[in-house]
Image (spheres, grey):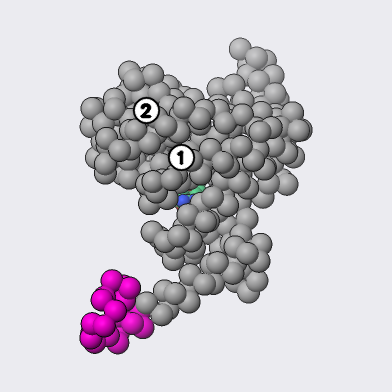
Amino acid sequence: QAKSFGRNQLHVFDVQHDHAVQTQHTRQTRVAQALHAGELVLHYQPKVNLRTGEIIGLEALLRWQHPQEGLLGPQHLLPLVEDTDLQVELGEWVLRQALAQMRQWTDAGMLWEVSVNIAAPHFHRPNFVPRLKDILHTCLEVSPTRLELEILESAALEDMQYMRSMMQSCQALGVRFALDDFGTGYSSLSYLKRLPAETIKIDQSFVRGILEDGDDLTLVQAIVALAAAFHRHVVAEGVETAEHAARLLELGCERAQGYGIARPMPAHEVLGWARDHAARHAARAVQNAAER
Ligand code: C2E
Ligand code: MG
Ligand code: MG
Ligand code: MG
């Protein structure tokens, strides 16, 4: 703020504002320290095909292993760095970390996709694409086609033309896109037509209500139909129960993510979870065949 004033210009600081800037600065410093001290980690939440049981991929979700307060969610970090250089540094760290993890899973024979959430101000940086290209080049063992960038639908609507061209430049590198929290951004048909995202993720607030709220059910049905019409994949977020999963399958939504399938977990637990998941699914398939 103060930087914008002329060098010799007199101005009176707003004490309260100055204080706010101070604490903001202190919090950001704390986040920077956490990043450099290795207190930040990514947890991974599986995304599966409900019908086949196949693991499609995992979403990387930021966590802060705070020395005093324990494991903190992204809401304790992200608002503090909104629209700052630190947000970009953090976002690039998440990308590098996710790629390194993908390489490990690839070595174990698991060609899973990994989805990374990208904050809109980070995505809007003019050098986002060359930076992404550099990051991808540091990890040649992983095909960029297995990296998916999740952009909030609401953010994607802000500057369509620019958004579209940015997404196309990234796609030229091989990476793919998902529109996150879809349905909350007042999308219209024409918006989806113009945004080259391969996947849309139905916001969990609608998914949660499909069993008892007719409006939510109608909305989810409409989004599934929209996705099919535009040849996009659709993923339901926030699938918490077997009833939700069964209803989604009836609605033609096969891909899902949620606590009912798996909670976000540390990277080292993922291979074990995948083995258990495959065994559970095989057992269920046998049971279904026996009942038929
Ligand atoms: P999101 O991308 O929509 O991620 C889904 C959120 O829903 C995650 O919360 C996940 O833990 C939670 N979730 C998954 N399944 C269920 C369920 O069945 N029930 C309920 N109640 N919740 C479920 P989380 O990890 O707290 O992340 C919140 C948001 O923070 C994310 O929403 C995303 O927008 C943002 N975020 C997380 N990690 C990053 C990151 O590395 N970079 C950026 N820019 N944003 C991130
Ligand atoms: Mg997401
Ligand atoms: Mg979401
Ligand atoms: Mg969300």
Give coordinates of residue 286: x percent, y percent: 69, 19
| Residue at x-position 23% and y-position 27% | 190
26, above or below 115, in the image: below
Q: How many marks?
A: 2
| Residue at x-position 46% and y-position 29% | 171
**What are the residue bounds of the magenta stretch?**
1-20
201, above or below 152, in the image: above
Is 202 one of the magenta-colored residues?
A: no
Relative to residue 186, is residue 142 drawn left or right? right
Disc nearest the viewer among 2 and 1: 1
Relative to residue 150, is residue 157 drawn left or right? left
Relative to residue 219, is residue 94 drawn left or right? right
Location of the N terminus (image quadrant): bottom left
- Name the element at disc 2: loop
Foreground residue, 191 or 253?
191
Give coordinates of residue 52: x percent, y percent: 59, 21
The crowding category of the residue bearing disc 1, from other C-alpha atoms within 10 Å (few below 14, some 14 to 19, many at least 20), is: some
Return the residue at label 1.
Answer: 129
| Residue at x-position 26% and y-position 83% | 8
Relative to residue 85, is residue 265 drawn left or right? right
Q: Earlier in the sequence, mark 2 or mark 1?
A: 1
Give coordinates of residue 145: x percent, y percent: 55, 28
Could you say which quadrant of the image residue 127 lies in?
Answer: top left
Instruction: Please name the amino acid that badge 1 sits on.
Output: Val
239, above or below 231, in the image: below
Return the residue at label 2.
Answer: 196
